Image: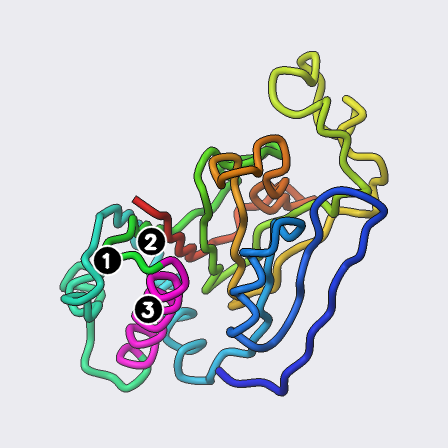
Amino acid sequence: MHAACHLEERPLASGPRTVRSTDPADLSRIYEPDVNLCIIERAPTPDVDAYVRSLLARATPIEVVRTIRFESFDGQDLLPETLRDQTAAYASWRRDVVRLTALFCDLFEAESVGLRLRTLDKPMCPRFHTDFVPARLICAYGGPGTQWLPEEAVDRRRLGSRSGGLPDAESGLIRRGDAVEEIPQYAIALLKGERWEGNEGRGAVHRSPQNAKGEPVPRLLLTLDLV
């Protein structure tokens, strides 16, 4: 999954910024105090995409939640045996998961991380929110990616219980309805949370993707957390 290097910064009058790039090295920009979201766009290799499509077509629920030590992680036992095969496509996908885990561990000098891999067919977090973690990596291998709001389009005073019980579209949380953005499929997204030192009240605002037609859309979602 390679692409020509491209970097785009979203300068704002005040508040956190988003960095969009095609170079994984730009994930390190998350350390900048005024950056709370890094999105590294990439195109999938045909074999990885083929394996993910076949995996979702089986409609077998996947729910993997574990703490892993990276030095011994090779992804071999990540999926149940019934979903593993000997194809090059499966091997390529597994190597990509290991690669993303390596990027995350190297970036934060972490020996262990919390890994979640799951299939979803409905929004897990339908409301816009911030995460109470230092940082989280997200990659949607299949289906639509996580939606997010740029800083100029969100009224943080309306997050969570402060919405007055109203839906996000009615509470005033979303300043502009056309401002909702979606992280591309296969992109590497690194979100800064509320527990990052000095970032309280400035975490990346995001939610699970919404399907306007109300029909289930299967997703294969990988998340990595610091533990």
**Label 2 amino acid?**
Leu
* Mark 3 to mark 1 CA distance (whole Å): 10 Å
**Residue at x-position 46% and y-position 84%:** 46
Question: In the displayed structure, would residue 112 be above or below residue 27?
Answer: above
Inter-mark Cα distance, 2 to 3: 16 Å
Judging by the rendered image, the residue that carries numbered circle 3 is 102
Residue to which mark 1 is pinned: 111
Amino acid beneath label 3: Ala
- Residue 149 occupies which quadrant of the picture? top right
Q: Are marks 2 and 3 in contact (CB under 8 Å)?
A: no
Q: Nearer the viewer, mark 2 or mark 1?
A: 1
- Looking at the image, tell me whether mark 3 or mark 1 is earlier in sequence order: 3
The segment highlighted magenta reads 90-108
Mark 3, Cα crowd under 10 Å, few <14 / some 14-19 / many 20+, is some
Q: Nearer the viewer, residue 182 or 142?
A: 182
Point 66% across, 66% down: residue: 20
Residue 167 is inside the magenta segment: no
96 within the magenta span? yes
- Disc 1: CA contacts within 10 A as few (<14), some (14-19) or many (>=20): some
Q: Are marks 3 and 1 in contact (CB under 8 Å)?
A: no
Q: Quadrant of the C terminus?
A: top left
How would you classify the magenta stretch by its main secondary structure?
A: helix
**CA gap, disc 2 to disc 1?**
19 Å
Q: Residue furthest top?
A: 164
Name which residue type carries label 1. Glu
Q: Are marks 2 and 1 in contact (CB under 8 Å)?
A: no
Q: Residue under label 2, please give it.
A: 117
Measuring from the top left, give residue 21's x and y in whole percent: 64, 72
Q: Nearer the viewer, mark 2 or mark 3?
A: 3
Tell me which corner region of the image, top left, top right, bottom left or bottom right, holds residue 19: bottom right
